[in-house]
Structure formats: structure tokens, C-alpha cells
Amino acid sequence: MTTTPNDPTAALPGRPPVVDLASWQAARDELLVREKAHTREGDTLAAARRRLPMVELDGTVEVVGPDGPVPFLDLFQGRDELVVYKHMWYDGAPHQGQCEGCTTTAWHLKDAAYLNARGVSFAVLTTGSWDEVASYVAFMGYTQPWYSVRGVDAPVGGDMGYLTCFLREGDRVFLTYSTTGRGNERVNGSLGLLDMTPYGRGEAWEDNPQGWPQGGSPCWSWRSDAEGNATWGPTSRPVPQWTRPGATPVETLGRHSHHH
């Protein structure tokens, strides 16, 4: 039996309704009005962000990188602005035992060429000891500047899992902005693309129509086994790690196995 685009029998279970192009365009145009309002509200939030006050800090505080201890000021690389991602760290854990959320954030920021072109430097900070961090960075193939802030107070050190912005005026350094949780999502372009798809992120908290595939917990898909199945346990690791050389896990995760 052939079906026309408007034939209700063309509806597929667990899928959006099937309509003709003109009907789709009308629905799309209606949503676009709301999307544009959302965009403009985002612009006003960004404008408010630029008007936040700032806090001066000691730019000579030392962090540890590949060349040993260096003043925090060096992370600006001579530029006026600096964005850092603070990567959580589990001491002594195998590579696959590190945070899948931080891994996916860092993976989406492997190259800061466009930031650099706008006078903004980028670095990853973490509380791990430098020898462990250096091994992990080499395994992941990361090219961004990484530094250990072990034992360093906030706002340079402190709690991890944050995106934080700093401004330099000569040798003076200022904290201008910091965010965490879902505030970190703007780095992860994959989430934005998933939000455009019919099935979204595949997370249980999403508002989905009846009959849609059952979602999992937030970031459930960021750790998987070799076949790409979302899982936590001795056979799993953060998703980007399956692209690394020699990626088969050889150690159990122990107490890190259910962190998400």
C-alpha cells in the first residue's frame, strides 16, 4: 500500500508525525520565533556578564606544567584574557578512571586557535600531581596547555569542574567570571547538535513525547565499553579514550567505577 505524506497511516511509532513540506515549514517557522527570542535573551545575558565586577588575585602564584613551576601570569601567553577549564582529578586512578564529564569538555577544547586569534589564551588546570597529569595528557594526545594546581587556593586552584575567565592588566590579574554544572555545556558542541535531533541527548530528564526511546542519567553516554554501549565498570572508559592507542582497559576502576 502506498501512503501520501498526509496519510495518518504513515505515522511511525516513536517517531515525529509525518506531514508535507508546507506543514513542516509552518511548524518550523513557529518554533523559529521562540528560538530567536532565546538567542536575544542569551545576548542580553552575555552583555550582563561583561558588566560583572572583577576580583584581583596574585598573578605570581605558581602552577606546575611541563617546564616545572611557573607563575599563573605565564598562562596568559602575553595576551590580555585567559579562559581555563578546571579538570577534576582522581589521584592514582588509571586513565579510564578519570572523569568522563571533564574528559568530554576537554576533548571539545583541543585547539584554541580561534580564541588565540581574539586575544584569548586557554589552559586546563587540574589538582592531579604533575607526573600523573603528564602521563594522562600524553595518553589522550592533548595539545592544550595543562597545569597542576595541586595545593593552590581558589580562584586559580580550589574546586574543579569549572570554566573560569581571567583578565590581565600588565602584571595585575583579575577573576571576571566562573561557571560550573550546565554552565559548562557551551564548550560541548556535541550537546548542542544533539539538542537539534529528534531523540535529543537520550537523557531521562528531557521532555520527550510518549513512545520515545528511554533515556538514561545525565552524561550516561559519556562512558562506554569497546562496542560503544554506555556503561560504567571495569570494561568502560570515557568515550574519547576509545580513539587513543592501546585503549583496552587493563585495570579495574574500583571505587571510581560509578562516578558520573
Image: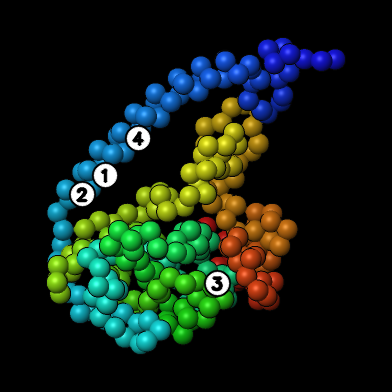
Q: What amino acid type should be assigned to the residue bearing mark 4?
A: Thr
Report the disc number at residue 46.
1
- Mark 2 to mark 1: distance in Å? 6 Å
- Mark 1 to mark 4: distance in Å? 11 Å
Report the disc number at residue 50.
2
Question: Which is more N-terminal, label 3 or label 1?
Answer: 1
Quarter occupied by residue 95: bottom right
Q: What amino acid type should be assigned to the residue bearing mark 2?
A: Arg
**Residue 39 visible here:** yes
Q: What amino acid type should be assigned to the residue bearing mark 1?
A: Ala
**SS class of the residue under badge 1?**
helix
218 on left or right of 182: right
Question: Which is more N-terminal, label 4 or label 1?
Answer: 4
- Labels 2 and 1 touching (C-beta < 8 A): yes
Give residue 8's position: percent from left, percent from top: 71, 13
252 on left or right of 91: right
Q: Which residue is mark 4?
A: 39
Q: Which residue is mark 3?
A: 140
Q: Nearer the viewer, residue 92 or 190?
A: 190
